[in-house]
Amino acid sequence: MNALKSIKKPMKIGTPLLLATLLVKGVQAHCPLCTIGVAAVAGGAMWLGVNTMIISLFVGAFAVSTGWWVGRMIKKKYIPYQTTAIVLASFLLTIIPLLPLLKNIYPIFISWTGDYGSLLNRTYIIDLALVGSMLGGAIVAIAPWLSSRISALRKGKILPFQGVLLTLALLVVTGAIIQVMLS
């Protein structure tokens, strides 16, 4: 009897959630296909041994895409800038726990006077995983605007999966450029 009760409670919660998911008409900027595509590329990059900055590029894109998708699913506005807050929370809650795993510290020496011993000259430490994730998030944020510009140039014509293809193409090209620069 206890086993039956333990099954009924998840069914009471899970059935409405499943129905709600199936009844969602769609979202404007990002969709599950975009999110799954970004996650698949990031997982594939890790499996292939790609630089952690590039992996963080895709993880940052995944985090922003997921936050944007969830933020647009919630129709009722509870707080000002709700979608922005959800995107930011998704990014921070995804990236911060992963930073120790994706740690990629890079020193940059900036010489203002030419002499290493001068007080003006400094070596700065940059976490490339954090930079990569912010760059990936920025690409995902810019892709819908770029897609609309392409559609406007084509007089309203949209290619099938244009937003998904554009986002993934921008991420792959950016990742390839970074890989070449860091090799």
Image (cartoon, helix red, strand yellow):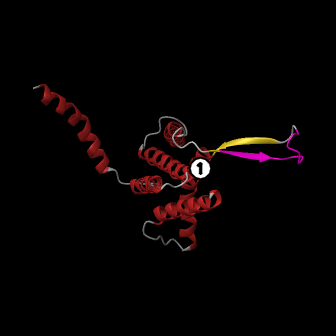
Q: Write the start and end of the magenta stretch as one range.
A: 106-118
Identify whether 112 is placed above or below 34.
above
The residue positioned farthest toward the top in the image shown: 2
- Which is nearer the eye, 134 or 64? 134
Q: Position of residue 92 (x, y in %)?
A: 53, 38
- Which is nearer the eye, 129 or 21? 129
Q: Main secondary structure of the magenta part?
A: loop
- The residue that appears at 40% across and 57% down in the rendered structure is 33
On screen, residue 104 versus residue 4, left or right, reads right
Q: Position of residue 176 (x, y in %)?
A: 57, 62
The residue positioned farthest toward the bottom in the image shown: 154
- The residue that appears at 51% across and 71% down in the rendered structure is 156
Location of residue 99 by image quarter: top right
Q: Is residue 108 magenta?
A: yes
Amino acid type at image mark 1: Gly
Q: Position of residue 3 (x, y in %)?
A: 14, 29
The C terminus lies in which quarter of the figure? bottom right
Q: Position of residue 179 (x, y in %)?
A: 59, 59
The N terminus lies in which quarter of the figure? top left
- The residue that appears at 56% across and 48% down in the rendered structure is 133
Location of residue 7 by image quarter: top left
Residue receiving disc 1: 132
- Which is nearer the eye, 145 or 34? 34
- The residue that appears at 42% across and 55% down in the rendered structure is 40
On screen, residue 170 versus residue 164, left or right, reads right
Mark 1 Cα-neighbour bin, 10 Å: few <14, some 14–19, many ≥20: many
Q: How many marks?
A: 1
User: Which type of secondary structure does the marked residue at label 1 adopt?
Assistant: helix
